[in-house]
């Protein structure tokens, strides 16, 4: 248990400090997309694309590719016409 913590803590610290500001932007973008989706009346094609972009963005965020995630989510936001 103690050995595991000794391994995990520096790793967690490294991830924290290596994470750019983008890391905090993706969840905010996803929340905005979710909120906009509830109110939006999109075509079926747009809805499918936004849903796919939203899912891809979340995967990229989870994988640590925050810059890519922000870019992907920006495309979804453009379709939804939100900032
Ligand atoms: Cu992120």
Image (tube, grey):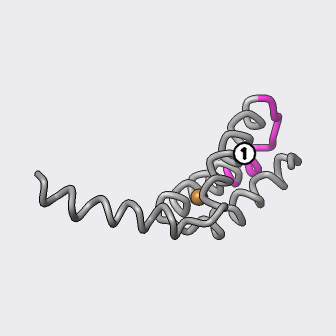
**Which residue: 64% across, 69% down?**
68
| Ligand 1 falls in quadrant | bottom right
Quadrant assignment, res 35: top right
Quadrant assignment, res 41: top right
**In the image, is residue 42 part of the stretch drawn in magenta?**
yes
Which residue is nearer to you in this view: 17 or 24?
17
Residue 39 image offset from top left, x and y in percent:
80, 29
**Which residue: 13% across, 54% down?**
2
Outermost residue toward the top in this view = 39
Read off the residue under disc 1: 47
SS category of the residue bearing label 1? helix
Classify residue 45 as left or right of residue 55: right
**Numbered circles on residues, count:** 1
**Which residue: 65% across, 69% down?**
67
Residues drawn in magenta: 39-49
Classify residue 61 as left or right of residue 45: left
45 shown above or below 20: above
Disc 1: residue Cβ within 8 A of ligand 1's nearest atom: no
Residue 5 image offset from top left, x and y in percent:
21, 56
Which residue is nearer to you in this view: 79 or 11?
11
Residue 52 image offset from top left, x and y in percent:
62, 54
Quadrant assignment, res 21: bottom right
75 shown above or below 36: below
Residue 10 image offset from top left, x and y in percent:
33, 65
Which residue is nearer to you in this view: 81 or 69?
69
By secondary structure, the bulk of the magenta-drawn segment is best described as helix
């Amino acid at each position: 248990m103690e050995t595991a913590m000794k391994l995990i803590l520096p790793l967690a610290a490294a991830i924290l400090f290596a994470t750019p500001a983008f890391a905090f932007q993706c969840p905010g973008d996803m929340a905005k997309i979710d909120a906009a989706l509830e109110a939006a009346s999109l075509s079926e094609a747009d809805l499918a694309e936004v849903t796919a972009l939203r899912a891809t963005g979340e995967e990229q965020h989870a994988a640590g590719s925050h810059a890519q995630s922000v870019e992907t989510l920006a495309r979804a936001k453009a379709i939804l016409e939100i900032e």
